Image (spheres, rainbow, N blue to C red):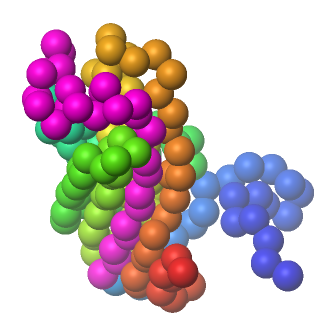
Amino acid sequence: MKKLSHFDEQGKIKMVDVSEKETSARRAVASASVLLNKETIEILRSNENPKGNPLEIARIAGIMAAKRTSELIPLCHQINLSKVDVKTEITDAGVYLEAEAKTASQTGVEMEALTAVSVAALTIYDMCKAVQKDIVITEIRLESKQGGKSGDFRRN
């Protein structure tokens, strides 16, 4: 049975030692959804939000957040990111977000991709709360990862 990697033999929390791991190309994609009502979706589509374009601001916020993941998640390693991209799409239910993070490192970039979509979703919430109070952020999840010892993963 697999065990949690951030605990030592005595059960104390530790940062995982990746110093002996090989550097390899790694990529992760995460997604999230922000559920909005029809009025808010129409405001986004017509670009009439009183605070500006939430989708573009969310993209930038997500990229910035990915770069600071190790400051937000206590035991997350600092890694050099070679790419972070956040895509936004207005759907009939609200906004779909997808973040891609890439690196050549000794550890993966799943947390950076997940942080990017999470902060992007929070930014859309912040930008739209003036017109809708019951916004729901949902389905924050890893879609895929490539590279590393544990191998590739793709959500079905």
Looking at the image, which residue is at 40% across and 18% down?
A: 132
- Give x and y (percent) for residue 123: 32, 29
Instruction: Residue 22 in the image: state x and y as whole percent.
Output: 41, 84
Image side of residue 81 versus residue 113, left or right: left
Quarter of the image where the N terminus is located: bottom right
Q: Mark yes or no: residue 78 visible.
A: no
Residue 43, located in which quarter of the rendered image? top left
Magenta segment boundaries in residue numbering: 25-52
99 to the left or right of 60: right
Q: Say if 134 sits above or below 154 in the image.
A: above
**In which quarter of the view is residue 7 placed?**
bottom right
The structure residue drawn at horizontal position 52% and vertical position 59%, both measured from the top left corner, is 141
Residue 9: % across, % down = 85, 64
Q: Is residue 8 left or right of residue 94?
A: right
Visible in this render: residue 10?
Answer: yes
Front residue of 66 and 106 = 66
The location of residue 35, given as percent across then percent down, is 44, 39
| Residue drawn at (51%, 88%) of the image | 151
**Quarter location, residue 52:** top left
* Figure quadrant of the C terminus: bottom right
Asked if residue 39 is among those painted magenta in the image, a careful observer would answer yes
Classify 25 as above or below 118: below
Q: How many marks?
A: 0
Q: State whether residue 28 is above or below residue 63.
A: below
Is residue 49 within the magenta segment? yes
Q: Residue furthest right?
A: 10
Task: Out of 83 and 54, give the one closest to the viewer.
Answer: 54
Most foreground residue, 74 or 62: 62
User: As displayed, is residue 111 above or below residue 73?
Assistant: below
